[in-house]
Structure formats: structure tokens, C-alpha cells
Image (cartoon, rainbow, N blue to C red):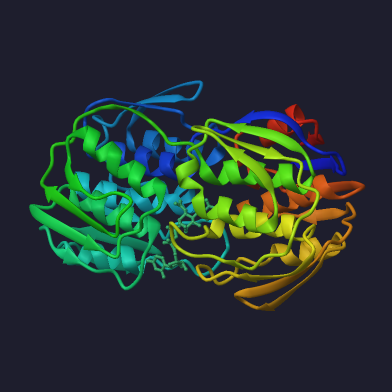
Amino acid sequence: MAKYIIEGGRPLRGRVKVSGSKNAALAILAATLLTKETCEISNVPDISDVEIMCKILEDLGAEIERRAKAIKISTRLVKSYRPSPSLVGRMRASVLLMGALLGRFGKVIIPHPGGDLIGPRPIDIHLDGFRSLGAKISFKNNLYFLSSSGLSGQKIIPRQESVTGTENIIMAATSASGKTTLRLAACEPEVEDLINFFKKMGIRIKGGGTHQIEVFGPASPKGVKYAIIPDRIEAGTFAIAAAATKGDVLIEKIRPDHLESFLNKLKEIGVNFKVGKDFLHIKSSPHLRAANIKTAQYPGFATDFQAPISALLTQAKGRSLIFETIFEERLSYISELVKMGAAAKILNPHEAEILGPTKLYGTKLRIHDLRAGATLILAALVASSKSEIHQAEIIDRGYENLEGKLLSLGAKIKRIS
Ligand code: EPZ
């Protein structure tokens, strides 16, 4: 297992380009199963979750060419609807193969997806959606067996919003005969990106960034060229790194419209910044104020920012309350921040408090999940001494070349395998 050695206490300075969105890329790569024609996807982040998705697709018979940040993929030779259980078990996004393979073959045999341990993460919303469309589902020997002799469009209202649940249901709905109306759909930019990919493929679909999506099937999706949106969570992570280290950083190739709630929160905390068409310039922000965080579905404050922003709040004056409304176990990083000297405590599985500002000290830290890992790196960049952060591979899942980007901003970070 690799580890990061970070010597913090240095303001980050310079400019950094954000990579393509992990969660948009994973959904769009799965969706290439819906066409037998070749797709060319650009601005794909070079991260291990994308590697796993490509391995799963190649294992099914897809032909993939990777050049820098572009992926050329043809699934015309794919015959199997049984993705590799060991690979599926490594990330949550594998769940998207259900909708794609159900749409392509009317059949799927797949285990429960893996993913960050941030709660039980059931998939009942996905399965209920597939059943509404006419799929038969059974579960034995730790495998879901989905089959349908033909899906038909329906009105579907899930019991609650789900990002990959929305993506999965509309993926399957592309092959259903008739209109599917999905209400209480997730509006995240990554869902909208998948829908824009569908529109480009010639699928008749209305919505995207809205709580109602209509899919008119069955569709005959064409192969297309498509560029993935920038990763809003990576953009925010660098903004926090700059503000927390009292630095001055220009973050480029972003979509500011995907960051509105996040930027409002930075303003509330007293972070000085300038927003342009495709950039965010974080300027030195000496006086940070405590703020309360309550996560919500888009366009609310994203749960993926909840842990990283807490590293910033350890440097803010006053008492901040964190309320994680989406996941049940997404506060594990608090105990690691306390080891560094933060005055923080978990109040219950959904709430924590942080008193600041406190001086942070480097120490040995363990990464629990992807965004908690990013949080510890941010805290280590603030800490006045050396930190050792183990399980660096978890960071590789969702951040492209994080240590290289931080080095270019003047951070003292090195990776030891
Ligand atoms: C997606 O996860 C993202 N992952 C997550 O990003 C993100 O945190 C999350 O959406 C929320 O925005 C990908 O897109 C691959 P949900 P997802 O279904 O789809 C419950 C990251 O760090 N639920 O919107 O799994 C669920 O347990 C990752 O990049 C059910 O109960 O999230 C959670 O409490 C982490 N039943 C809530 O809904 C279901 O069938 C929202 O989950 C599905 C979900």
C-alpha cells in the first residue's frame, strides 16, 4: 500500500487545471453498452475507478483504446451480460451496468456493487425502477438475476432521489417501448451530463438537471464523440486547499454554474475569491468564520464536499455544525482530524461540531474513503509538521495525479509505494 508524506504549513500558490468528472465519466462509459457503434469520449479523468470500469467493459468484450484523456470504445462484440464479480465489487458505479446491460440484452447477472463505506448503500430504488419497467429480479448466491422479455415505459416515482438510481432507470428506459416518466429524478450535473450524452446519441429524452425526466423508447442509440464535464468535487477540493493554507490559487477548466451552493458557503466562511467563465481564483483569506453545513441533493451543498470543507472549518473562528443528511456513516474522518489537534466531535451518526481555529499537527493518518482521504490531505497541508497518510490508492480512485497537482502549487508532498 502506498502512502503520502506531507509537510504542511505552506500557502499553496499557482494555477491548476481540473480533470473530467469521475462520476459523469463512469456513467457515460457504462452507457456505451447501449450502442454497437463506436463512441469517442474525451476529458476522461485518469483515475483508477475509470480503469476498473474499462476493465469490466473489456472483460465483457468491449474494444477500448485509451489515448491520454480520451477513450475510444466499441461494445459491438459484447455478448456477455455477466460482469466480473470481483471488479464489480470494487466500486459503486458498477451498479450502472445493471441498467446498461438490461437495456442492451434484457438480462443481467451481477453482484451487489462495492464502493465507499459511507453507509449501507442499498439499491432498492434501482431494482424497484427496473421492476416498474417490467424486469423480473431474483437474488441467490450473492448475485442479482435480472431479466425481461421486453421492457415497457412507465410513470415512476422513486421513494427518494438517487443519483445512480436515476441514471440506471433512464439507462434501462431507453430500450423500453413507449414513454417513461421518471419523477423525483436526481438533478446532479453528472446526471445531466449522461442525459446530454443520450441526446447526442439520438435518444429522445426530455429533462436533465430537472426533477422530471421523460424517455421515449425504444431507442437506437448511435455512436458519438462526447466531452465529459469538469469534476466539480475536484475543483472544490482545490479551492479548500488554497483557502485553508491561506494561499492564492487559480483553478482552471471548471464549470462555476455547478458550484453555486459551494461558492455561497465559501463566501459565508469569508474566503476571498473571484469567479470567471471557466475559472475560480482563490485569494488569500486571513479571516475565516465558522459556518453550519447541511448537505442536500443538487443544487444543495453536495455531500461529497462535507468532509473536505470540515478541514477548512478547523481554521475558521467559532463553532461550525456539520449535518450530513445523505449518508449514514460519512463522519469517520473526524477522529483523524482530532488526532491532528482539531477541536471536533461527532454528536450522532449525522452530526458533528468543529470549534476553530485550532493549530493542526502532522501525524500518522488512515484513509477511510475517497473524500475522507482528500480531507486528511487538506488538513495535512495546513498542519505545521509532517503527516504520513496511508492507503494512498484510495485517493487514486477519484483524483487524477493529486500529488503532482499539489506539488505544482508548492506543496511539500511525496508518495512512497
Ligand atoms: C452517487 O452515489 C455518487 N457516486 C456519490 O459520489 C455521491 O456522494 C452520491 O451520488 C450523492 O450525491 C457515483 O455517482 C458513482 P445516491 P449514489 O443513490 O448514487 C440512499 C464520490 O465520492 N439510497 O444518490 O450511490 C443511499 O444509501 C461518491 O464520488 C437508497 O436508500 O448515491 C444514500 O443514503 C461517494 N436506495 C442516498 O440514498 C437506493 O437504491 C443517496 O444515495 C439508492 C440510494
**Residue 397's spot in the image, x, y percent?**
58, 43
In the image, taking residue 172 as reference, residue 82 lies left or right, namely right
Relative to 215, residue 256 above or below: above
- Asked if residue 33 shows in the view, the reply is no
Q: State whether residue 403 appears in this view.
A: yes
Q: Is residue 235 above or below residue 270?
A: above
Pinpoint residue 252: horizontal percent, then vertical percent: 58, 30
Q: Between residue 362 and residue 112, name the one nearer to us.
A: 362
Q: Ligand 1 falls in which quarter?
A: bottom left
**Which quadrant, please, contains the N terminus?**
top right
Seen as rendered, the residue at the extreme bottom is 348
- Residue at the spot x=70%, y=34% of the render? 249
Task: Please provide percent x and percent y for residue 116.
Answer: 56, 57
Q: Report the front residue among 355 and 400.
A: 355
Q: Residue at x 25, y 49 (%)?
A: 171
Can you tell which quarter of the image residue 182 is in? Answer: bottom left
x and y, in percent, of residue 91 in the image:
50, 51
Is residue 131 positioned above or below 77 on the image? Answer: below
* Residue 35 drawn above or below residue 104: above
**Left-right relation of 281 to 303:** right
Q: Tell me what residue is drawn at x 60 percent, y 75 percent.
A: 350
Q: Looking at the figure, which quarter contains the C terminus?
A: top right
Going 53% across and 68% down the picture, which residue do you hit? Answer: 327
